[in-house]
Amino acid sequence: MSNNHAERTLSRRLAAQVLYESIITGDAAWDIADRADAVPDAGKLPDYAVKLVRGVGSHEAEINRLLTAASKNWSVDRMPLVDRSIMSVAVYEMRYADDVPVSVAINEAIELARSFGGEDESAGFVNGVLGSIARSLEAAAAAESASGEGDAE
């Protein structure tokens, strides 16, 4: 279990780096992820990192919508690029990865923000935005469940 955790943590880090590079260079993230040297000194990306990059790319519009809605007075384009890349990975996991608890996605993102961003500001920003998204996803799921229960009667 611990090895899987370490592998996923590394995959999140590498995926965020690829997404960041994609924003900077304008190259498609999935093209970068497919390169043997996607991240210098990392070699070929682990399968989970590729899954994250492709997932973020496939759901980019929805992820950006959630990020914008959750961040008061900040459009996605104005967010610090590192934070945006990290949060995109976390939002993908929160929304589309059934095997990742929301709390894990948020905690991992906060740790990445501490590593890559400004220690206090990035981690707090990431925590606030992702916490807001978690609450909105939870509310949407509860509303969907309640409307589904009414339909079954």
Image (cartoon, grey):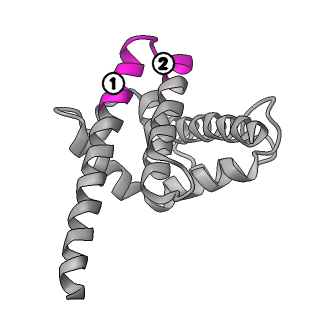
**Residue 125: mark:** 1
What residue would you read off at disc 2? 117
SS assignment at label 1: helix
Query: In the image, is residue 134 above or below residue 58?
Result: above
In this rendering, position of residue 97 left or right of residue 70: right
SS assignment at label 2: loop
> Does 116 lie within the magenta span?
yes
Provide residue 76's location: percent of width, then percent of height.
31, 39
Specify the segment rendered in magenta: 113-128
The one of 38 and 100 positioned closer to us in this rendering = 100
Residue 85 in sight: no
The number of discs equals 2
Provide residue 82's location: percent of width, then percent of height.
47, 28
The C terminus, quarter of image: bottom left
**Which one is in front in this view, the residue at disc 1 or the one at disc 2?**
1
Tag 2: amino acid: Gly
Query: In the image, is residue 76 above or below residue 142?
Result: above
In this rendering, position of residue 42 left or right of residue 79: right
Query: In the image, is residue 83 above or below residue 142?
Result: above
The one of 138 and 75 positioned closer to us in this rendering = 138
Disc 1 to disc 2: CB gap under 8 Å: yes
Distance from the alpha carbon under mark 1 to that under mark 2? 10 Å
